[in-house]
Amino acid sequence: MDFRLTEGQERYREAVRHWVADNIPEMEALPYPADPTPEQMRERYALWQRKRFDFRLTCVHWPEAVGGAGLTAMEHFIVTEEIDTLNVAPNLNIIGFGMCLPVILHAGSGEQRNRYIPAALRGEEIWCQLFSEPGAGSDLAGLTTRAEPDGKGWRVNGQKTWTSYAHFADRGLCLARSESSASRHRGLTMFLVDMRREGVSVRPIRINNGDHVFNEVFFDNVYVEPEDVLGEVHGGWKVAIDTLMFERGTSNIHILMRPQIDKVIALAKERLAGAAPTLGNQAARGEIARLITRLKVMDIQGLRVLHGATTGAPPGPEGSFVKLDWSEINQRAQALALDLLGPAGALLGDNPAVPEGGWFPKNWLRSFANTIEAGSSEILRNIVSERILGLPKDAQRQNPNRAR
Amino acid sequence: MDLRYDENQILIQDQAREFIARESPLEQVHEWRRSETPLPGPVWQGMAAMGWLGAILPEDYGGMGLSLTDLSRILEEMGRGLLPGPFLPTLTAAHAVLLGGPQEMRRRILPAVVQGQLHLALARTQEGGRFDAMGGRFFADSTEGGYLLFGEKLAVPGLAEADHIVVAAVLGLPEKIDEGVAFFLIDPKVTGVVIEPLRTLDGGWTQASLRLDAVRVPAYRLLGENPGQGPSVNERVSALLDLSLAFDALGGAQHAMEIAVEYAKVRTAFGQPIGSYQAIKHKCADMLHAVESLRAIAMWAAWVMDASEPAQDATPALAAAMVRATAIETYDLVVRHATQVLGAIACTEEHVMHLFAKRAKTLSLAFGPLAYYQEIILRENGFGISAGSQGG
Ligand SMILES: Cc1cc2nc3c(=O)[nH]c(=O)nc-3n(C[C@H](O)[C@H](O)[C@H](O)COP(=O)(O)OP(=O)(O)OC[C@H]3O[C@@H](n4cnc5c(N)ncnc54)[C@H](O)[C@@H]3O)c2cc1C
């Protein structure tokens, strides 16, 4: 049993820290408004991502041939902790690096890898994930977007929704029905879609706090080349499942959530440290102790996932636990923040009386989606109980052709 | 980084599971509890023969010199099997002797413990809101050539059968409380020691009340080189106790969960196994989530305490408090959910589930409530209570 990184990994962390210290001032010197336009966001993202690529400090666990550094998931984790949590630039390709590109690396042809991965790593292309539809969320196999052969390639028609970052995306990983007669899971194909193509339209959806996070995406007879099928034709379900495995595997979302949770802990420290337990703050004290403890548990579960990934062990239940943990922990943390702020927790706007311009209530609202996005808590509990504990499938879902 | 148990640790665990299944199967434990029969002597002797009583004692005293991580493999199995008897009291009291006792005392006590000849008890935590040794209701007054000990404690695990008692007492008169706490080794047979056995909810440990009525204790029975040096021994013994209780909880919670999950696969209602209903399967998922969370933090806490150099992100005190807080919540959640999954059968005396429920509650009542550990977690994370606001 040893929780330490190797000496080599510690040295690597040091080197990354030095690189950060050397390169951050230059980024900070660049003008960047508090309320940037999408163009300004994109520009800053591209600049920072290019810089990281030039030093091979992005997706370092990917092969050198596609622009990675040929290191392990552990170094990737270190880089995520040391660089990504700083939020130097908006993380516009989080979906690409966490899901779309790993699955291209995993299931794609050599040509697909070479065509898409380096461009993304250089900061030139942003990806989105086009899975969910108005009629197909948890029950993804119920999707109805169609793909039909048109002699040469494919024509895609239909509607996707909740597509994060589609308003920035150059490309999308799109699951569509390629054979309507076949069973629900079999007639699906995964496509790599050019979001700039004619027939693609993206309409913003405002998330509950007013931010523009996700979109509706409409496909009107959009042409897709035959070489942009990922995996096998009609074999898209397997690719989709692999994508979700990456999401709960090495995407390190729980690390990316840390800054906002740490912000709540800092707030709590400001309000509670030094104060004796009283009836008024006892509940909050208990809650913050629980939060700190659960964060430690989550970190260790994250390490267990990583450890599995680096030793080649089959993925265990830890990935689902990490997802349940970060979503539930963050929701409780953001709710705690408002309790700590009292009436000021329900104020917005640029006023000295409003803590951080209303960041806390806005983020509290955003956290509502945490237990829905990236696999709802109910679906995760189904997975844990059925695949790990071996409990029978739900009575209603026993026919594998009817649901996910 | 390597987050697996090594071959030897797996072997230790396998042997522990076999031993317990053979010498103290759950049905037998159930029967012992029903008839209020203590752990039979031969089983204790068997534990000694396995080397468990000296697991973490140095080889000099006949021990095995194992790490806490090694020991945790045994503790988890004991928790799984609800093994009765004063193992934890003996383990922790012997550790106090090892850490603080003079050489002569160590030579006299420890090898006999290893061989299964002595049972020890640790009278450390107190009732009344403070659960550290500083909240003491035992006081030690210096007198010529030694100390006079006073005080009482309601429930001391393993005391009824103890051959020696390690008592934590505040040195000096009550107003000098901050001079610290020290451990003394006391012979239960000397004048002024009053022990009254009590019936218990759990039956896993015997419990007895302890009163010390001006018990004269010679100076050489003080553990710790100097008066006032107690806290370091205290801290280390506390951490060992917290970690041990957490692994006991882990094994027990894992077992209670398994019983419920197996039942959920075979019990049918409305023509379906109850495990196909989400209200049931989600309870099962939550049990596994809780158990695996406890496992994760317990593995880590044992490693923090084993490490020769301090861990970067945690003191042993913090690791101990976090693992205890998690253990209290986990075991409680699991016995509740497991009972719900099992239905009425789990609410009978005949079913074993109440044994797990009682153990869970005993573990969380015996050494301080959740809030106590939460305050340690806060203190170790810079949320401490400042001197000015003390006593609020
Ligand atoms: C912030 C955010 C970003 C997102 N980004 C993307 C994206 O980039 N790309 C993309 O493709 N999708 C995205 N999604 C969509 C997300 O994947 C879906 O919301 C999710 O799969 C759930 O689907 P749904 O919202 O349709 O809810 P439904 O599937 O309709 O579920 C509604 C409720 O029913 C429960 N439920 C459903 N089935 C079961 C069952 N079998 N057992 C028990 N309970 C059940 C769910 O848990 C939930 O509580 C995003 C969602 C959010 C909130």
Image (cartoon, coloured by chain):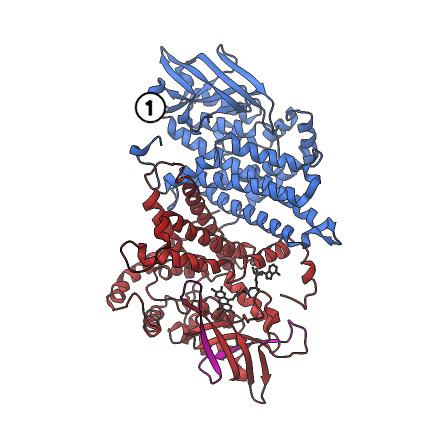
Q: Which one of the lettered chains is coloured red?
A: A
From the image, tell me which residue sits under label 1: B179
- At label 1, the amino acid type is Glu
- Residue B364 appears in the picture as rendered: yes
Q: Position of residue A387 (x, y in %)?
A: 62, 57
Ligand 1, by image quadrant, is bottom right
Q: How many marks?
A: 1
Q: Quadrant of residue A120?
A: bottom left
> Could you say which is closer to the camera, residue B386 or residue B24?
B386
**Chain to which mark 1 belongs:** B
Name which residue lies at 48% across and 37% down: B370
- Position of residue A239 relative to residue A292, above or below, is below
- Position of residue A381 relative to residue B200, above or below, is below
Name which residue lies at 30% across and 62% down: A19
Name which residue lies at 69% across and 33% down: B349
Taking the magenta stretch, the answer to whether it contains residue B170 is no
Q: Quadrant of residue A137?
A: bottom right
> Could you say which is closer to the camera, residue B308 or residue B303?
B303
> Could you say which is closer to the camera, residue A82 or residue B325?
B325
Q: Is mark 1 within 8 Å of ligand 1?
A: no
Q: Which residues are magenta?
A: A183-211
> Could you say which is closer to the camera, residue B52 or residue A45?
A45
A327 on left or right of B272: left
SS of the residue at dot 1?
helix
Outermost residue toward the left in this view: A29
Q: Position of residue A369 (x, y in %)?
A: 48, 60
Specify the quadrant that holds the C terminus of chain B.
Answer: top left
Identify the colour of chain B in the image: blue
